[in-house]
Image (cartoon, rainbow, N blue to C red):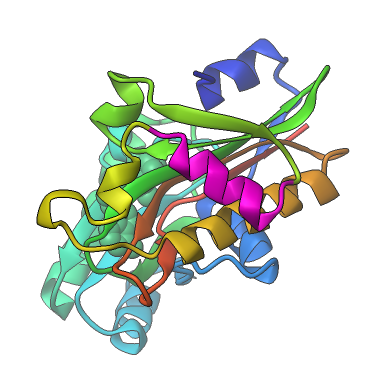
Amino acid sequence: LPDIEEAAEAKGSKQTALSEFTSKELLKKYGLPVTGGAIAASEAEAVAIAGRTGYPLVMKIESTDILHKSDVGGVVLNIDNEKAAVEAYRRILANAKKNAPNAKINGVLIQEMAPKGLEMIVGVNNDPQFGPVILCGLGGIFVEIFKDVALYPAPLNKNEALKMLASLEAYPLLTGARGQKVLDVDALADAIVTISKYAADNKNTVSQVDINPLLVYPKGEGVRAVDALVINK
Ligand code: ADP
Ligand code: MG
């Protein structure tokens, strides 16, 4: 299973990671549903953006030098009032300063808190030999312990994306096994096609794409990328 950061290091330090905000802007243009948000560069801006966004909301460190934001205390979920927003803003910057002292910080990304959904991973690794290869699987223990992922060369069409999903051990979780809700497999397949198209169209510049997680909602309610990381060559 390709680890984005290790692979990026292995290929040399010339690769440039884009921030979550920038990565999502690019994928949104292709039609991927994302929690976009806005970047606050001061406490006053954070309060203004939070007011516009509405509560509950999420704040995250925005830096191209921090690829795993949670690891440095750079993600605060479920912020539900202005006082908590100001506290989170301060805490995130303090955590970054302490845990990633050399990182260049662009600000704090503020976005809506997405409702709970099934957490999937969709990634692309642009292999020097094979070209862009798309990966999908359920997040969490499914990917880490069971290595339950499907791989396919990009770009792919919707039927191929649906076949990828059907090949997962965990596929029944998407289709309503054991009284679970039937999830929006259709929107998930569309998202896989969109991400594969982005990677294929930009294969001369893009090295990796990592959507972790893509939240999948009940049938008819779509999907949402709440995190995104694009790494360019
Ligand atoms: P990291 O860089 O550590 O991967 P993420 O942006 O993925 O940071 O955030 C960590 C976790 O927080 C995600 O896996 C997801 O469960 C949750 N999360 C992040 N953003 C949102 C959001 N906007 N709405 C709801 N949950 C979110
Ligand atoms: Mg993530």
Residue 43 location, x and y as percent?
32, 70
Magenta stretch, main secondary structure class: helix
Residue at screen point 64% across, 56% down: 158
Residue at screen point 83% across, 17% down: 129
- Residue that lies at the very extreme toward the bottom in this rendered image: 52
User: Is residue 70 rendered to the left or right of residue 225?
Assistant: left
Q: Above or below — where is 22 with respect to 50?
A: above
The residue lying toward the viewer, choosing from 151 and 3, is: 151
Q: Above or below — where is 20 with respect to 121?
A: below
Residue at screen point 54% across, 50% down: 162
Does residue 75 appear in the picture of this structure? no
User: Is residue 176 rendered to the left or right of residue 158?
Assistant: left
Residue at screen point 74% across, 45% down: 199
Examine the structure image and report whether residue 160 is included in the region drawn in magenta. yes
Q: What is the magenta range? A: 156-168
- Residue that lies at the very extreme toward the right in this rendered image: 204
Does residue 28 appear in the picture of this structure? yes
User: Is residue 79 rendered to the left or right of residue 49?
Assistant: left
Residue 93 location, x and y as percent?
32, 50
Examine the structure image and report whether residue 71 is included in the region drawn in magenta. no
Q: Quadrant of residue 142?
A: top left
Quarter of the picture holding the C terminus: top right
Q: Quadrant of residue 148?
A: top left
Residue 52 location, x and y as percent?
36, 88
The residue lying toward the viewer, choosing from 175 and 61, is: 175
The residue lying toward the viewer, choosing from 226 and 52, is: 226
The residue lying toward the viewer, choosing from 214 and 98, is: 214
Report the label total: 0
Residue 194 location, x and y as percent?
66, 58
Q: Above or below — where is 39 with respect to 122?
A: below
